[in-house]
Amino acid sequence: MKAAAVKLLVKASRAVLAARSLLERGDVDFAAGRAYYATFYTTEALLNDKGVNFRKHGSIHSAFGEHFVKTGLMDKRFHRWLLDSYDKRIMGDYGIESSLTSEDVKGMIEQTNEFLIEARKYFELG
């Protein structure tokens, strides 16, 4: 595994912890952002290890679908979770009156954690 991928997985783990902490304090919108970024960093780590790097979120989302879902390396639910968490992050970051609930964000955090675990398994097998 490339050094950058390791650092991104560490950053993803830290983002999960931050999301949990923010949620415990009632900062639902900000917790959603950290949960999304944990998923995003995990995705970046996977792509980085294949030598695929982008700056824009949409490009990273698409590349994950192309390099991991279409090839069968990762289940399509992870791609769906990435896209859904991005939408929730946008709601939380830019919405004046967010409709996100604690349960929404708790689910995001659980999905992110599952994705992170699956990514680590991928690296162990690779």
Image (spheres, rainbow, N blue to C red):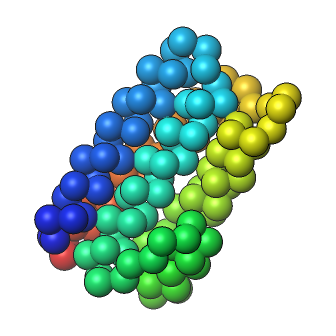
* Place of residue 101 in the rendered image (x, y in percent of width and height, measured from the top left): 73, 26
**Quarter residue 115 falls in:** bottom left
- Residue sitting nearer the eye, 102 or 8: 8
**Quarter residue 43 falls in:** bottom left
* Place of residue 84 in the rendered image (x, y in percent of width and height, measured from the top left): 67, 54
**Quarter residue 91 falls in:** top right
Residue drawn where x is 19% and y is 58% of the image: 6
Q: How many marks?
A: 0
The answer to whether residue 20 of the structure is visible from this angle is: yes
111 horizontally vs 90: left or right = left
* Place of residue 22 in the rendered image (x, y in percent of width and height, measured from the top left): 51, 22
- Residue sitting nearer the eye, 27 or 77: 27
**Quarter containing the C terminus:** bottom left
* Place of residue 109 in the rendered image (x, y in percent of width and height, measured from the top left): 51, 37
Q: Residue furthest top?
A: 25
88 horizontally vs 31: left or right = right
60 horizontally vs 44: left or right = right
Residue drawn where x is 55% and y is 21% of the image: 23
Residue drawn where x is 16% and y is 71% of the image: 2
The answer to whether residue 76 of the structure is visible from this angle is: no
Q: Is residue 111 above or below residue 81?
A: above
Residue drawn where x is 48% and y is 48% of the image: 37
105 horizontally vs 10: left or right = right
Q: Is residue 33 above or below residue 83?
A: above
**Quarter containing the N terminus:** bottom left
